[in-house]
């Protein structure tokens, strides 16, 4: 595996390899000294062209737990607005002599385009509405941890699927591991052609939740929506928000995931966030372990 | 000038229906004779067995970027690219900097063309001032200065009332209006076609309806005003259907399609290559099929490249930030020939879509090999196999959607007014 | 990771796909199973060695509460189990035990090295003040033990670290000693020493 640009490009075996590695990494995070020397002397660049504290910090912790050095490079605005080409960006990065590049951008395709211009492995930390592979990996890891496996489970993803990179990566990951994936959301937020991936679009949240093992709630991004895709936040939460009552339609042992940050009371009821089925905090812990596994795997010899 | 004879070529002249092996004589920059046993001894003979001799191609939709963006292309380099592609006449669009909405700019372009162009250049002026879609341009003065048509191409005239008046007034001036049909509201910030590929890539897409709603509107307005409406770069199946219907109802509409829309689909965006980003976007295989059929049955009158150069550094940015547009003068011929190879149309008709059908749309005297016409001709090797090497492009820009693709069919020689402006054997031919 | 092959069921997975053998694999050519082998320790001999090692450990570390038997995953797990049972029997009380995976501390992994999948570590206690006995099946170059020492020290400051191995086959590359050894077996570098389950039940050590 040379890069991690998206779950679309990796297979089931590679996913399971990363998850198994993440198990070991999780244990390290539970030790008193949360550090192993494995990436000693290695440098990770966190190139966050779209601001994000949570994911960046997660990658930073992951790097440091492996004894790697982490350099944070943030910039806002597009390459164009800085009048810098991707080639220029790649050359500047090359001068930093790093071992792995973690990239987040608000537009799709940037990690891939950079991977074609740099000589080091690239990890996609989220590119526009395209993919967020480490999020999907930690999501499937959390399901594996909570339910013992993913195969044959019913996974429901609810929200603004059209603009969600988490949704796309989750769809690929859960399908590749043998789950049945359902999606639900306002019709204005359903991307064209999504059924071709093998998911089952549901016409209502009730249909999507019925008998589900895993419920993934997507964040409603007020700031990212274009035009009027839904009339109001209130109406959204009334039609697509997850309440304790709706949660009852799922299996009794169902779990709830959310990539964060949560809009309490909008896409997810505040009581659901704090309830037993919620694995939201586990996701954060597992996120570091999964990212450690990714950094470990991509920096080996022959990468 | 000397008398040149091109001997033994297959003469394909769609304007007269000629498609046979004949000789052709050129004298004083004009075609003096076409026939089997021509009289007289020419000073120069070019043996052209196995090759085709066609009228020079006519591109009614090119962006030459001069004045204002000469770093992307200028009239000199753009027309060199045209000549290399077998074109002898191009029409340049008005979205220059400053916009060509005044006679002074039109005259400037015409003068620059006289001084520096390798091929004939006709000027298309803006339909509205500044391309803002609000107040119509001084069409009468622009026509007097030489403008052959009006277009806000690059922008859309979103206000129906404005479009109506533009059509009426242009009709009065006797020039067609070339419409860039792309509803900016439906398009939003879309960069590709709305479909499964856009979804997988996480890119914003706009559906074919972003085009067809305005095609529908403009067809209605053309019917209302009786003016000549020409639809630029048709890309969606529904647009073709509506144009076909309008034509049979007697509306004065013509249409063009680009080579890239005839050849490619939105599948190519998957690698995020910004050289697959243009407006209107590449659409589905079904759209492509309907476009090919539309060109074959004449619903779409001609091929026009929408040659849109951009500097490499402008394209080397995030997909959503990159400018829209691809070049196309140097790769149009082989794509059109493919349609003939697929038996959708005869070779005569295919060449016609590049020559007299295009000239006819704008009423240009071009695209013909009849005796007495200017010797604007192209010598074609229909079987030549070649690969697009960006470094060998004559255009100043490299933004082709066809890099590394193999083509079959090449313009070997191009003459404008009897003067050789392109020789594919000449490796030092100026870029 | 021990110097021996895994007991029959083990095959190591790495990022490059599934590959046979552990880190210091000398494996080359036809399957090792096809190579001529002889048993150097049979089940009876192993039992005797384990008994002796258990006694020695308790002699040297007089307070069983201070002992931590730490198996080096995966080769040392079975051996540590045997030793742990004996120690508990002799001491009359259970003794702390853990399993330590040293993959991420290996000198051929650190940096831009190999990428085998790490296994679980179970060290549910702090090693501070304890006398840690690292247990592996075979000690060879000593690199695994060094990695294990680094790992243990990351869990805290032990009172002492000692090493127990069923087999010491020589060829040290680092100054590592084995405090409790079942048997010293001289070998040449190209040979393999395997600790595995025996067909008749129990375990055996073979030299290939």
Image (cartoon, rainbow, N blue to C red):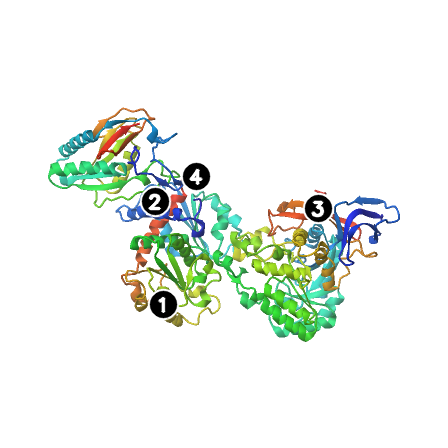
Q: Which residue is mark 3?
A: B430
- Using the numbered discs, state the Cα–Cα distance from disc 3 to disc 2 in whole angstroms: 57 Å
Residue B238 lies, in percent from the top left, at 59, 66
Residue B212 lies, in percent from the top left, at 59, 67
Q: Secondary structure at mark 4?
A: loop
Q: Which residue is mark 1?
A: A206
Nearer the observer, disc 4 or disc 1?
1
- Using the numbered discs, state the Cα–Cα distance from disc 2 to disc 4 in whole angstroms: 19 Å
- Using the numbered discs, state the Cα–Cα distance from disc 3 to disc 4 in whole angstroms: 45 Å
Residue A32 lies, in percent from the top left, at 25, 47
Residue drawn at point x = 40 percent, y = 54 percent? A175
How crowded pointer 1 is (Cα within 10 Å; few <14, some 14-19, many 20+) is rated as: some
Residue drawn at point x = 31 percent, y = 57 percent? A281
Q: Are marks 4 and 1 on the same chain?
A: yes
Among numbered discs 2 and 1, the one appearing first in the sequence: 2
- Observer able to see residue C61: yes
Q: Secondary structure at mark 3?
A: loop
In the picture, measured across the screen, residue A60 lies left or right of residue B6, that is left
Q: Is residue C89 above or below residue B341?
A: above
Checking the image for residue A302, the label placed there is: 4
Between A63 and A12, the one lying in front of the other is A12
Q: Secondary structure at mark 2?
A: loop
């Amino acid at each position: 595996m040379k890069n991690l640009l998206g779950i679309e490009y990796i297979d089931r075996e590679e996913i399971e390899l990363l998850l198994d590695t993440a198990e070991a990494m999780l244990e390290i995070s539970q030790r008193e000294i949360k550090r192993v020397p494995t990436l000693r002397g290695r440098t990770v660049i966190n190139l966050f062209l779209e601001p994000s504290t949570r994911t960046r910090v997660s990658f930073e912790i992951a790097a440091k737990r492996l004894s790697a050095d982490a350099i944070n490079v943030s910039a806002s605005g597009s390459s164009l607005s800085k009048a810098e080409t991707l080639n220029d960006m790649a050359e500047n990065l090359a001068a930093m002599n790093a071992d792995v590049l973690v990239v987040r951008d608000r537009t799709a395709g940037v990690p891939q385009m950079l991977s074609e211009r740099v000589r080091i492995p690239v990890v996609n930390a989220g590119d526009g509405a395209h993919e967020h592979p480490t999020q999907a990996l930690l999501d499937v890891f959390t399901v594996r941890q909570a339910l013992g496996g993913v195969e044959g489970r019913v996974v429901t993803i609810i929200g603004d699927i059209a603009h969600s990179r988490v949704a796309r990566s989750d769809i690929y990951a859960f399908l590749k591991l043998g789950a049945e994936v359902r999606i639900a959301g306002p019709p204005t937020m359903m991307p064209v052609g999504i059924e071709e991936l093998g998911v089952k679009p549901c016409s209502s949240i009730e249909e999507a939740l019925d008998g589900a093992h895993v419920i993934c709630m997507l964040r409603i991004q007020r700031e990212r929506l274009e035009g009027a895709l839904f009339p109001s936040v209130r109406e959204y939460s009334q039609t697509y928000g997850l309440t304790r009552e709706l949660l009852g339609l799922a299996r009794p042992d169902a779990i709830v995931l959310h990539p964060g940050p949560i809009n309490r009371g909008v896409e997810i009821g505040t009581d659901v966030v704090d309830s037993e089925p919620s694995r939201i905090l586990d996701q954060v812990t597992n996120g570091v372990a999964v990212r450690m596994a990714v950094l470990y795997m991509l920096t080996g010899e022959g990468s | 000038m000397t008398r040149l004879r091109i001997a033994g070529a297959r003469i394909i002249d769609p304007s007269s229906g000629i498609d046979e092996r004949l000789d052709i004589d050129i004298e004083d920059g004009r075609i003096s004779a076409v026939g089997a046993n021509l009289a007289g001894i020419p000073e120069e003979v070019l043996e052209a067995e196995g090759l085709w001799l066609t009228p020079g191609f006519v591109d009614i939709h090119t962006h030459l970027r001069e004045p204002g963006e000469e770093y992307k292309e200028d009239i000199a380099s753009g027309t060199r690219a045209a000549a290399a592609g077998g074109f002898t006449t191009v029409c340049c669009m008005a979205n220059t900097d400053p916009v060509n909405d005044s006679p002074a700019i039109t005259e400037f372009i015409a003068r620059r063309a006289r001084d520096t162009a390798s091929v004939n250049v006709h000027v298309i002026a803006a339909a509205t001032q500044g391309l803002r879609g609000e107040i119509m341009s001084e069409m009468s003065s622009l026509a007097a200065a030489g403008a052959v048509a009006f277009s806000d191409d690059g922008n859309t005239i979103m206000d129906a009332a404005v479009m109506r008046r533009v059509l009426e007034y242009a009709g009065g001036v006797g020039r067609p209006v070339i419409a860039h049909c792309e509803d900016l509201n439906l398009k939003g910030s879309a960069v590709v076609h709305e479909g499964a590929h856009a979804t997988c890539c996480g890119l914003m897409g706009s559906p074919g309806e972003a085009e067809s709603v305005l095609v529908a509107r403009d067809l209605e307005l053309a019917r209302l005003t009786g003016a000549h409406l020409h639809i630029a770069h048709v890309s969606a199946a529904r647009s073709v259907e509506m144009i076909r219907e309008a034509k049979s109802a007697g509306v004065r509409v013509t249409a063009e399609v680009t080579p890239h829309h005839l050849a490619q689909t939105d599948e190519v965006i998957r690698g995020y290559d910004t050289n697959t980003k243009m407006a209107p976007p590449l659409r589905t295989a079904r759209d492509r099929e309907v476009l090919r059929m539309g060109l074959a049955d004449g619903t779409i009158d001609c091929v026009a490249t929408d040659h849109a150069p951009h500097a490499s550094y402008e394209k080397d940015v995030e997909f959503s930030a990159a400018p829209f547009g691809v070049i196309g003068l140097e790769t149009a011929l082989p794509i059109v020939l493919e349609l003939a190879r697929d038996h959708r149309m005869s070779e005569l008709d295919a060449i016609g879509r590049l020559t007299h059908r295009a000239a006819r749309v704008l009423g240009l005297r071009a695209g013909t090999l009849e005796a007495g016409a200017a010797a604007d001709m192209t010598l074609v090797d229909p079987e030549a196999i070649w690969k697009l090497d960006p470094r060998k492009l004559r255009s100043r820009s490299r933004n082709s959607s066809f890099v590394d693709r193999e083509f079959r069919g090449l313009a070997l020689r191009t003459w404008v007014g009897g003067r050789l402006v392109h020789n594919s054997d000449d490796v030092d031919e100026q870029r | 990771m021990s110097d021996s092959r895994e007991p029959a069921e083990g095959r190591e997975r790495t990022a490059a796909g599934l590959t046979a053998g552990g880190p210091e694999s000398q494996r080359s050519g036809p399957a090792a199973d096809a190579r001529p082998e002889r048993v150097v320790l049979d089940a009876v001999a192993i039992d005797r060695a384990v008994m002796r090692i258990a006694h020695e450990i308790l002699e040297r570390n007089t307070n069983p509460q201070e002992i931590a038997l730490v198996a080096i995953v995966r080769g040392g797990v079975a051996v540590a189990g045997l030793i742990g049972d004996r120690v508990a029997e002799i001491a009359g009380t259970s003794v702390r035990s853990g399993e330590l995976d040293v993959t991420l501390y290996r000198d051929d992994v650190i940096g831009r090295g190999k990428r085998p999948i790490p296994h679980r570590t179970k060290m549910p206690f702090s090693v501070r003040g304890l006398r840690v006995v690292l247990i592996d099946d075979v000690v060879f170059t000593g690199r695994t033990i060094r990695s294990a020492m680094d790992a243990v020290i990351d869990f805290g400051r032990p009172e002492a670290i000692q090493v127990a191995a069923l087999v010491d086959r020589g060829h040290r590359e680092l100054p590592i000693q084995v405090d409790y050894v079942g048997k010293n077996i001289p070998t040449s570098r190209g040979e393999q020493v395997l600790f595995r389950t025996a067909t008749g039940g129990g375990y055996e050590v073979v030299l290939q």
